[in-house]
Structures are given as C-alpha cells and as structure tokens.
Amino acid sequence: MLNQVADGVWVRQSGWVWSNAIVVRGDDGLILVDPGIDGSELDQLADDVDRLGIPVVAGFSTHPHWDHLLWHPRFGDVPRYATSACAHAATEARERGQKMAAESASGIPLELFGLVTPLPADGGPLPGEIIEHDAHAVGHAAVLLADRGVLLAGDMLSDVLVPIFDPRRPDQVSAYEAALDRLGEAAKQVDVLVPGHGAVAEGPEVAIRFAVDRAYLDALRRGEEPVDARWGPRGS
Ligand SMILES: [Zn+2]
C-alpha cells in the first residue's frame, strides 16, 4: 500500500528490512525511487502506481546496493538514473548484485537489475536537488524536494539501522560526519524525512534522527562501542 507523506510523494514499505519504495510526482509523470523488494511486492507497487493514474517516466537509485537497484517490467521501459559514480559502480558490480538479490529476495526480475545511467546535469525528470556525498556507498545521493518539504535520505538517518560504512573506502567516520552536515543543512527546509529503511520521520522526529546518528559517530570517535538499539554490523 502506498502512503502519501507529502504532496506528490508516496511510500510503500517492504517487510524486508523495512525498505521504502518511494514514488515522486514530477512535471512529466512519476519517478520511482529505490523500488523494492521482492517480485510480488514490485508487482503490488505496479498496481498501486496504476491506481494513481499517472505514467512512470523514470527511476532513480540512491546508491549502488542491490536492494536499491531493482525494477519490474510493469514499471515500463523508461530511463533509470543514479549519480554518475553510482551508475558506474552498479554497472561494474552488476553480476555480484544480481547474485545477492537472488539470494536475498524472491521473484526479482534479475534481467532488469542495476540498469542505471547517469542522471542528466539538469536532473532530467527528477524534481528537486541531488545531494551527493561519500558516506555509506559510492555515489550515494539524497534527494531534497524543498517545495514539498521532503528529504529522501537513501541509506542514511534510519531508525532501524545504525550508520553503515563503506568498507572499501578510508575514513568513513569523517565522510559520514560531512554527509550529515550537508543533509542537516538540507533538512532545515523539510518536515518529512524518508529513509531507505525504517519509519518516515516527521516534524521533531527529523532532528532526532540526526542526533542519534551523530551520537553513534561521536562514540566511535571516543573509541567507545556505541550504545545503540538499532541493527547493524558495526563498522561493516
Ligand atoms: Zn545501502
């Protein structure tokens, strides 16, 4: 089921790690952000989208992890975008991603997995502003929909997952802190934050998401084991 969280922004949550598929209305039609997860859910999302009665014109993947690179034939043969670094990483690791997707969820159309290309410089059909940063994964992008008061955070600022670092790159704590600074600036313009996994944060909950992630990073900086009830492989 799609839940409308703001004007022209809907979210469908999966049971798989509370993953959020996001539907954004642009000028020309709908953009599906990180649709997931298993095949039957993608099919249900297609039903939900049909009911909106607006065509899908594009897809967008926030980052090159398998659970953010999915698609379904019923969404149509439309361009699927990502940042240039994300598109490059997704293409390079496509086979590995397909394998992970097949092992982790059922009924995923693997032939459509990871087919993303760089977003045009003007954003193409995707409304809002891309905020690309170096935390969590190469080419990770949040999407600021300032006119709707919404920030699509990708795999940041979750209430169910701790900050998860990119194991292939150095000094991810600093990268994460810098990313939170930039997202924090963007969040001044919003009252709804949609994470890739977990509950949508509204109003005062948005600031709490930042505070909890910063507390986790601060503990790491002090050399302590963070006390955090959220799930996550520490340092993975
Ligand atoms: Zn991720």
Image (spheres, grey):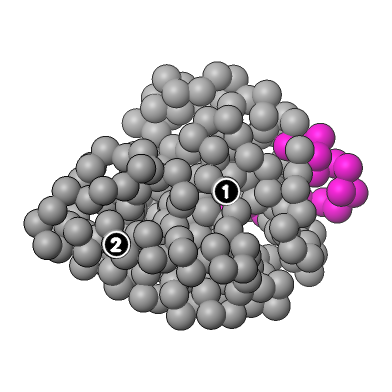
Q: Nearest the camera: 185 or 28?
A: 185
Choose between 4 and 70: the one closer to the eye.
4
In the rendered image, the vertical position of residue 88 relative to residue 126, given as above or below: above
222 relative to 1 in the view: left or right: left
Above or below: residue 18 compared with residue 217? above
Q: Is residue 209 visible?
A: yes
Where disc 2 sits, the SS reads helix
What percent of the width, then of the height, locates residue 158? 46, 52
**Residue 114 in the image, given as x and y percentages of width and height:** 49, 41
Give the image location of residue 111, x and y in percent. Answer: 54, 29
Q: In the picture, residue 132 is in which quadrant?
A: bottom left
Residue under the image location 76 percent in, 38 percent down: 1
Residue 31, located in which quarter of the rendered image? bottom right
Q: Is residue 143 visible?
A: no
Residue that badge 2 annotates: 215
Residue matched to label 1: 199
In which quadrant of the rendered image does the C terminus lie? Answer: top left
Q: Identify which residue is drawn at 54% across, 38% down.
A: 18
Q: Amino acid at mark 1?
A: Ala
Could you tell which of marks 1 and 2 lies nearer the N-terminus?
1
Which circle, 1 or 2, is nearer the viewer? 2
Farthest residue to the left: give it. Answer: 223
Rendered location of residue 56, percent (x, y):
76, 50
Q: Amino acid at mark 2?
A: Ala
Q: Which residues are magenta?
A: 45-61
The residue closer to the viewer here, 45 or 220, is 220
Residue 16 or residue 77, whichever sits in front: 16
- Left or right of 162? Residue 172 is left
Dot 2 crowding, Cα within 10 Å, few <14, some 14–19, many 20+: some
